Amino acid sequence: MGLTRNAAGRKAALSAAELRREGRTVIALAGNPNVGKSTIFNALTGMNQHTGNWPGKTVATARGLCRSGEREYIMVDLPGAYSLMAHSAEEELARDFICFGGAEAVVVVCDATCLERNMNLVLQTMELTGRVLVCVNLMDEAERKNISIDLDGLSHRLGAPVLGLTARERGCAEKILSALDRLLASPPAEPLSCLPYPEPIKKAAERLLPMAEAACGGRLSGRWLSLRLLAGDEGAARRANAFLSGALVEHEALLSAAARERQALEAAFPTETRVEDALASALVRAGEELCRGLVRADENSARRDRRIDRLLTGRLLGYPLMLLLLALVFYLTIAGANYPSRLLSSLLFSLEAPLGSALKALGAPPWLRGMLAEGAYRVLAWVVSVMLPPMAIFFPLFTLLEDAGYLPRVAYNLDRPFKSCRACGKQALTMCMGFGCNAAGVVGCRIIDSPRERLLAILTNSFVPCNGRFPMLIAILTMFFAGGAEGGAVLGAGLLTGVILLGVAATFGATKLLSETLLKGMPSSFVLELPPYRRPQIAKVIVRSVFDRTLFVLGRAAAVAAPAGALLWLMANTYFGGESLINICAEFLEPLGQAMGLDGVLLLAFILGFPANEIVLPIAVMIYTAQGGLTELGSLSEMRQLLILNGWTGVTAACVLVFSLMHWPCSTTLLTIKKETGSWKWTAAAAIIPTAAGFVCCLLLSAAAKLLGF
């Protein structure tokens, strides 16, 4: 197997040992994607772990503390995994913690609407440990679809406790904790050893078992290790060797015997049914047999979902309906955000004078008062008043689509285009995350197994506009293209949808170019489970979107907006030769800005807006008005007049839209890219690629406009 002695694999066990200090019990929470693990985790721990109705939400472990009447538990929420025969990064992480993490029990969460498919993971987990609690979640969905499950019969056949749950209902946590108390109070059962694997594999595993048990020393299931060696799973073998402190390498007889047995098995099985496939097929058959007679389903109950899917994912209507829903979300955002934004702006800017007076009363010098009140606070007030209302509308609407089960359909629709770009279809999911926050989209790229395809997704995620860019896009579209038209909000939503599609098209183009140059390779396949449609819990969706997304993004923007405001004030109020530093910089950039269809002020605004995209337009307005700080304008019409007086045309507005779509990511996103890739080279590439695309597109657009006489 090419194993080497090392101790890296001790980390999982050591971390679990540390978690067990002070008498705490470590429990692993596992399950297929989209079965409600994170919802159960939240119910148990009270932590605000984000949940959603689409796979791939959990891309790393989350830990939380909970207490029953008898014990203190550390719950470890693992990434979604279909199997412990790991084929992706998230499945590897789940396998490693269950196998080597030292958990004292495993809670396996299943979907009641497709129980047979979930039995694969249950059976593999029971091969490893005798302490397994099976939680059959979404019992309400099963009831709605007229699916009945004999839970007692299933518990009897498995030889393990089985709970029926609806994770969203009260009392779920208490049921699980009581069951865990009972499970840990009784002696552990023997791991499963009677699964119906093909006879040649069973006999080969039996021959290896004594040597495997000697190598494991009781720390790991010898039967599981034998099967992994026979399947040629080098990743699992390396991790097992590391976990056993290199003991596996020392048992040369075991490795030699495993190689001989595997060679014999490969000769016994046809090429198209390799040992790994035979093991997987046996688990599927075992799951089907286990559920036979215990799960009764009404075939007519799934017809509604299939009819809806034929519309939302069909070749004829899938894309038009997707665009229509996107445009509707943008229309509601634009139409609903204007009035609250004005109210919030009036409130926040009215507090600036009292803040200045308070600083004066405290004895602060004039320069400090100006930097804090007219710089840091004014920029902060602008960002909050511009960002908060559209976010408070957009994020709940987006979360409702997610909670209802529509976003996986979007990923399904976009899978084929990404495949044509030689990328992974999962990139569609990370692109959707980028609409909320590009940094979140970059973190979400962990769900992509292939390093090449993960890099493709990371490097191109910023081509779709994050929430911080929406206010400027909406403002420019409203001022220059839709403000004076009848039904301006509808037209603005349609135009914004077009701009978003331009960003998506740029994502495809950049992905295709990179996959044929810097990151050559073939696309990999992946499993995308389409969850059932669910009625969203509107109150929970609103609360979750406000706290998980709106306030998180707003807090991030505010954290960089205030220091940026202070820096802007200093630049605007520092003079050389009678001219402010900020104007000197703008004049220096003027030739390049003019060539791009912008001007030096706009280009400088984009540069100074590096900490947060939200402040680009306010910076430009500040420079245009020659003020020492940002100036509040009463309405978009006043801002439009100011911009026109400073040379803006429709071409300028179009170039600003293009460059706002395609330029360097914000500082938070770039720091996230550095953390995810561990490379400054790829971080620089993530900044250079969209910026180069934006420069080229603006130059071409400006040249074409001049050629046509605009």
Image (cartoon, rainbow, N blue to C red):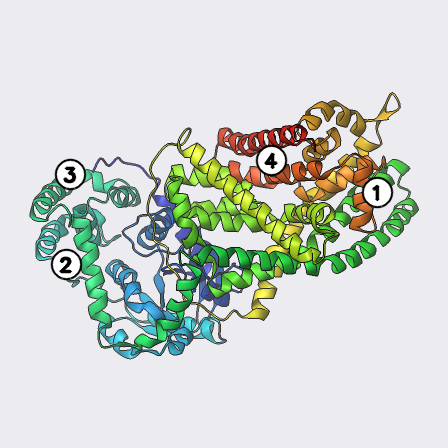
Q: Tell me the crowding category of disc 2: few under 14, some 14 to 19, or many 20 or more residues within 10 angstroms, Cα based.
A: some
Which tag is nearer the camera, tag 3 or tag 2? 2
Q: Nearer the viewer, residue 243 or 701?
A: 701
Per the rendering, the mark at residue 663 is 4
Residue 707 position in % (x across, y down): 65, 28
Kindly identify the amino acid type of the residue bearing the numbered disc 3. Answer: Glu
Tell me the residue at 32%/57% (across/down). 82
Q: Nearer the viewer, residue 289 or 356?
A: 289
Per the rendering, the mark at residue 520 is none
Q: CA distance from mark 1 to mark 4?
A: 28 Å
Is residue 377 rendered to the left or right of residue 214? right
Q: Circle 1 sits on which residue?
A: 374
Residues tagged 3 and 2 counted as in contact (Cβ below 8 A): no
Q: CA distance from mark 3 to mark 2?
A: 26 Å
Q: Tell me the crowding category of disc 4: few under 14, some 14 to 19, or many 20 or more residues within 10 angstroms, Cα based.
A: many
Mark 4 or mark 3, which is nearer the start of the sequence? 3
Per the rendering, the mark at residue 252 is 3
Residues tagged 1 and 4 counted as in contact (Cβ below 8 A): no
Is residue 293 rendered to the left or right of residue 483? left
Is residue 28 rendered to the left or right of residue 348? left
Tell me the residue at 11%/56% (across/down). 202
Residues tagged 3 and 4 counted as in contact (Cβ below 8 A): no
Q: CA distance from mark 3 to mark 4?
A: 56 Å
Which tag is nearer the camera, tag 1 or tag 4? 4
Q: Circle 2 sits on which residue?
A: 197
Q: CA distance from mark 4 to mark 2?
A: 55 Å
